[in-house]
Every structure is written in structure tokens, then in C-alpha cells.
Image (tube, coloured by chain):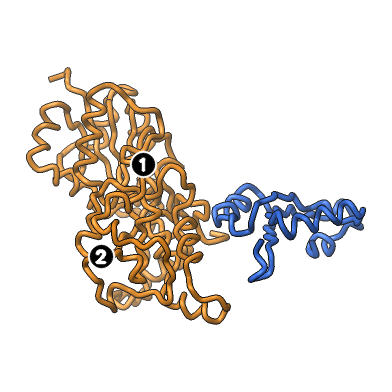
């Protein structure tokens, strides 16, 4: 059936959860395959890179790429799909902002390799063997992709047309995006295909959010119980809701866990981490430096808390000098 | 401003830091204005941005200033408890 628009999925530095969200379409996936031709989806279908290379430039209508870019292979595939596609969508938090893999930007490449191949408790590697980029055996040369020094969101590597946020994006957003693309009424380039308002707006506990917040201490969900009816932030847990885009239906809050910020910021905010940091810091009750330090002890990993998904795409991007 | 002085008005070829300064309208900005009116010279490294209160300074402004090439950011605000 040559008439159906061609759709490609690809994954880069990601966990596979985004692929799962495609499967989560359940019976709606039948609607998707009725209307589009999936021509490339390494996790679900048996197509090879050479199949993609056979298409003319721009012949694929949409490529949905999830995952951040941290290796030469991912960059090569992203560039290939960009060339072959009319529209490229950064799918999920990793492609949009770097996501969890982006937190690797806190460490140097050598530190990471040393930990993974030598020092981590589950590693037994007495000869300190590391993967080689090239290896020749019996005249056959095999090679591995190279790990880059920094993790980058997709739009720092190729031109990206649209973004679908989330870790993973909700199936609802994916379905809506497919409908928009099929309708032919394309939104302006750079649009994030999700509501442009903070999560608190759709939070079921919205009415219990006090107008004035004053944090005496910060609590952690693994050490303290969360009251299931009250605004989580007002209880002293860091909830990223005020600085996070809605669209997920407040899933985490409905499961009695604070929002961790995977949908990224709204269009008015440039740096999600700085924004929530600013909001939370202004509401700390303590006034002296010593008391403030004490209060902030409840947040032992500020980068991992405030920039959990957005470090690689933020203004900070990475640790200095890597 | 101390930084600017230390790194030398003596030799113009020396590296000069670019400092973005967010000044509160009611204290630091007024003081800088008074210094100007009084013809007190100071180093030209500072680019002053007036804000109506240092509380208006969003951490994003600071990150943005550094990202766009500032070597330092100076925030001038009132003493605690002295807010306009």
C-alpha cells in the first residue's frame, strides 16, 4: 500500500519506556497502523538501517526519535532519519531535554567508564578490560560506537520539528500527535505537542494548595509518609508540579508520589531546574544562613532533584570542563 | 566592582571581566546614580540592569547572563529587613 504515510520509530540513549508507551496505545495502535505504514521500528519490527537508506530524502513523513544522543551510532542514525524524513519529532524527555541519561553530564567520560568497567560493586574485571572501538580478529575488523563526552538532547544534534514530552509520554499525547499530523494542519515548528500550562492545573489536589508556603524542612518520599489528600509540596516534599508542563493527567500525584518534572517546563520557562529552585528557595521559612543550610539538608541531591530530566538541555548543560 | 579594579585599569590590554549587575532600584541603583552625579569614577566593566527589587532576580537571569558570556554577575539589594 504505497499511499499510506510512512512512519519511523527509533531509540537512542533511552530506557525503552517510550517504546512501551507506543505499545500502551493498546487497541488504538490498530488505528495507527490502519492509517500509517511503520517502516522502521527496531524494537518492534525487523527492519535494518539499510532499509531506511533505500528511501529517498524526505520520503518518510514522520520520524519519532526517543532518547538522548551520547554515541556516534545514535548521532549517525539521527542524522540519517533527519535526511529521510519530512518531520522529526523528539519523543520523550530524553530526546527533548536529555532525560535521565543527561545526568551523566555531571561526570567525565573516564569517571563513568572506570565506574562501570572497574569499580562498581557488581563488576569483576581483574584485567580491567574495556571495550575497544576497533578489534581485528582473523582478518575481520569489528567496531563499536564511540561514547561522546557529553549527552545532548536531539535538537542539539539535528533539526527537530516538534516535541512530545514525558517519561514516557502518555499514549494520549501520542495519539493526539498522530491525529494532528494526519489532519495535515501542522502546528508551527518547535511546538511542544502538550498543554502549555503547569501540572498543578490538572492536579486533583489543586484545591489544597495554600497560597502561602513556608518550608520548615524538606521530606523525602522514601523516609516519610505522604498524606494522600493534601498538596504534596505543602507537606514539604519537593514536587516539581509548579514548574512542570501538564499533559500526563497528574499520574504520579494520583499514585501519591510527588511530580518529578518529566514533562519539562512550559514555553515561558527557559530552565526548569532554576525555576523550581527559585520558587522553593523563596519559600524557605528560615532566615539565617545556618537555619537555611539545615532546611536544605532535606535535599541531598539538588541537581538530581531539580534537573532530573532537563540537565543536558538546560542552560547549565553539564559540569564545567567536560 | 572590586574585581574590576583589581584586574587593572592600568593596562588596557589585560583581560577585562564583563560583569552583569542587577541593581535594586531603591538602594544599589540609587547609589550608583548618586556616584555618577557626584562624578566618582568607577571601572567600566559593569553592565547595569535596573530591577525594581533584587527579589525580581530569577536564577534564570543569572544562568542566562553566564551563558551569554558574562564573567561575573553582581546582585545589589537592600540589607535584610530593609526592603523598600
Describe residue A173's horizontal placement relative to residue A93 as left or right. Answer: left
User: Which of A102 and A285 lies nearest the eye of the viewer?
Assistant: A285
User: Which of A166 and A202 lies nearest the eye of the viewer?
Assistant: A202
Chain B colour? blue
Pinpoint residue A123: horizontal percent, then vertical percent.
30, 74
Say what secondary structure mark 2 lies in. loop
- At a point 33% along the width and 29% down the height, the residue shown is A87
Pinpoint residue A208: horizontal percent, then vertical percent.
29, 62
Chain identity of mark 1: A
Instruction: Give above or below for A248 relative to B82.
Output: above
The quadrant in which the C terminus of chain B is found is bottom right
**Which class describes the residues within 10 Å of circle 2: few (<14), some (14-19), or many (20+)?**
some
Say what secondary structure mark 1 lies in. loop
Return the residue at label 1. Answer: A196
Describe residue B51's horizontal placement relative to residue A41 as left or right. Answer: right
- Give me the chain that's orange: A
- At a point 68% along the width and 62% down the height, the residue shown is B77
- At a point 34% along the width and 23% down the height, the residue shown is A57
Amino acid at each position: 500500500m504505497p499511499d499510506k504515510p510512512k512512519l519511523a520509530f527509533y531509540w537512542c540513549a533511552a530506557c525503552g519506556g517510550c517504546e512501551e508507551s507506543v505499545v500502551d496505545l493498546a487497541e488504538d495502535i490498530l488505528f495507527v497502523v490502519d492509517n500509517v505504514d511503520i517502516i522502521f521500528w527496531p524494537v518492534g519490527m525487523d527492519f535494518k538501517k539499510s532499509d531506511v537508506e533505500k528511501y529517498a530524502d524526505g520520503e518518510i513523513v514522520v520520524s519519532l526519535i526517543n532518547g538522548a544522543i551520547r554515541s556516534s551510532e545514535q548521532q549517525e542514525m539521527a542524522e540519517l532519519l533527519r535526511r529521510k524524513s519530512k518531520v522529526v519529532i523528539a519523543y520523550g524527555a530524553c530526546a527533548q531535554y536529555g532525560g535521565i541519561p543527561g545526568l551523566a553530564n555531571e561526570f567525565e567520560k573516564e569517571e563513568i567508564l572506570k565506574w562501570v568497567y572497574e569499580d562498581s560493586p557488581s563488576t569483576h574485571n581483574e584485567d580491567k578490560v574495556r571495550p575497544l572501538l576497533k578489534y581485528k580478529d582473523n582478518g575481520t575488523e569489528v567496531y563499536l560506537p564511540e561514547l561522546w563526552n557529553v549527552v545532548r538532547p536531539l535538537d542539539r544534534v539535528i533539526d527537530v520539528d516538534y516535541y512530545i514530552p514525558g517519561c514516557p509520554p502518555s499514549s494520549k499525547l501520542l495519539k493526539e500527535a498522530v491525529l494532528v499530523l494526519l489532519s495535515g494542519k501542522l502546528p508551527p515548528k518547535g511546538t511542544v505537542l502538550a498543554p502549555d500550562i503547569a501540572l498543578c492545573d490538572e492536579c486533583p489536589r489543586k484545591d489544597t494548595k495554600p497560597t502561602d508556603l513556608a518550608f520548615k524542612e524538606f521530606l523525602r518520599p522514601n523516609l516519610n509518609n505522604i498524606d494522600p489528600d493534601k498538596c504534596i509540596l505543602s507537606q514539604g516534599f519537593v514536587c516539581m508540579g509548579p514548574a512542570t508542563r501538564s499533559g500526563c493527567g497528574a499520574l504520579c500525584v494520583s499514585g501519591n508520589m510527588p511530580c518529578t518534572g518529566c514533562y519539562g517546563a512550559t514555553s515561558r520557562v527557559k530552565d526548569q531546574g532554576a525555576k523550581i529552585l527559585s520558587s522553593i528557595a523563596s519559600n524557605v521559612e528560615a532566615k539565617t544562613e545556618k537555619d537555611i543550610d539545615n532546611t536544605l539538608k532535606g535535599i541531598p541531591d539538588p541537581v538530581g532533584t531539580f534537573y532530573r530530566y532537563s540537565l543536558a538541555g538546560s542552560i547549565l548543560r553539564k559540569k564545567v570542563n567536560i | 566592582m572590586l574585581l574590576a579594579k583589581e584586574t587593572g585599569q592600568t593596562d588596557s590590554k589585560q583581560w577585562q571581566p564583563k560583569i552583569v549587575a542587577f541593581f535594586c532600584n531603591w538602594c544599589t541603583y540609587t547609589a550608583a546614580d548618586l556616584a555618577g552625579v557626584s562624578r566618582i569614577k568607577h571601572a567600566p566593566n559593569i553592565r547595569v540592569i535596573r530591577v525594581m527589587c533584587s527579589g525580581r532576580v530569577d536564577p534564570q537571569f543569572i544562568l542566562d547572563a553566564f551563558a551569554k558570556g558574562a564573567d561575573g554577575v553582581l546582585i545589589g539589594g537592600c540589607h535584610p529587613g530593609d526592603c523598600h
